[in-house]
Image (tube, grey):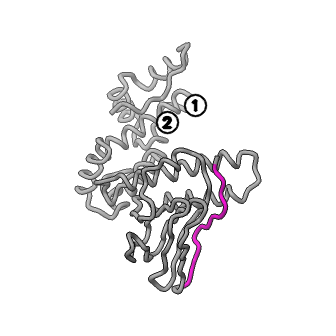
Amino acid sequence: MTNIYFIGCDAVHPDSFVFDIPEGHDCWLLVHTKTPALFLVNSEIKEYPAHSAVLFRPHQKIYYRACADKYINDWIRFDSTESYITATTLPFGVPFSLDDPEYCHQLFHLLSIENFSNKNYKESSIDYLLRTLFNKLLESYDSDNVSPLYYELLNLRVKIHNNPGNHWTVPIMADYLHISPGYLQTLYKNTFYISCMDDVIGSRIHMSKEYLIHGANSIAEISTFCGYNNVEHFCRQFKQLTGNTPGTFRMKAVHSSTPLVASNNEH
C-alpha cells in the first residue's frame, strides 16, 4: 500500500532556495534534480550535477539547496509498506546520477497526473508507476558501464521497430545520434548483439509477418509497407530468414489450426 502526500513535477525554485529538515519527514522523500544542487552528505556539503536522484528514508536529516540562478526538480513525499521501497538497496541521502533522466521525469509526470485523478484504478496505477520508477533508479545505481549513448541507441532501436518501412541506412541512423557511421555500427553491435542493418531487416520481416497473418494486403503491397523497393528482394530475404516464401507462410497461417505467431527471433 502506497500513499502519496505531495508530488511536484518541474518545480522551479529561486537561487535562494534551501530545504532544511533536521529531523527529516515522517515519510519517504524522493528527489530528482533537473539542475545542479548542493546536498549535505556525510556532514559535508557537496555539489551534485543535474539529473541526480536521491532517496531520503523517514526521519532522516534532509538538507539541500540551489547553487545556480534557479533550482528545478521533481519530487515526491509518500508512505509505503511495499518491500520494493522498504527493503530497497538504493542509498539513503546520497545522490546518484540517472542513466535516463527523461524517462524518470516522465514517470514523475505520470505519477502526478494519477495522484490528482479520481479514477477507479488510481491506487494500482500509482503502484505500477512507482515500481517502474524504482526499477529505473536501481538500474542507474547498479550500472557500472552503461554507454552514455545507451538510451539514445535504445530510442533509435524503438524507432526502427516501430517504423520498419522507413528508408533506414547506416548514415541516416548515425546522423540520428550525431556520430560517425563506423562508430554507430560498432556501438550498436556491442550494445544489442546484432548489427543495425540486421536489426532493420529483422524488424521488416517481423512486421511483414503481421500483415501476412492478419491482413488482406497483397504481397507486393506488404513489401512496400515494410520498406522494400521491389517484391523480389522482399521474397528472397523473407525466405532466407524464415525458411518459407511469404505466400507459403500466409497459406500455412490460414490453414493452421493453431494460428502462427509473428516471432522476432530470427537473429
Against 188, is 16 above or below?
A: below
Return the residue at label 1. 215
Residue 227, by quadrant, is top left
Over which residues does the magenta segment extend? 2-14
* Neighbours of disc 2 within 10 Å: few (<14), some (14-19), many (20+): many
Closer to us: 185 or 114: 114
Element on which disc 2 rests = helix
Residue 32: in magenta span: no
* Neighbours of disc 1 within 10 Å: few (<14), some (14-19), many (20+): few
C-beta proximity under 8 Å, tags 1 and 2: yes
Q: Which residue corresponds to the image point at 72% horizontal and 59% vertical from the top-left? A: 116
Against 207, is 58 above or below?
A: below
Element on which disc 1 rests = loop
Tell me where residue 85 appears, x and y as whole percent: 52, 50
Closer to us: 235 or 30: 30
- The reply, left or right, for residue 76 in relation to residue 205 is right
Against 75, is 168 above or below?
A: above
- The reply, left or right, for residue 229 in relation to residue 129 is left
Closer to us: 231 or 200: 200
Residue 12: in magenta span: yes
- Amino acid found under the numbered disc labelled 2: Ile
- The reply, left or right, for residue 56 in relation to residue 179 is right
Q: Which residue corresponds to the image point at 56% horizontal and 13% vertical from the top-left? A: 257
Q: Main secondary structure of the magenta part?
A: strand
Return the residue at label 2. 222
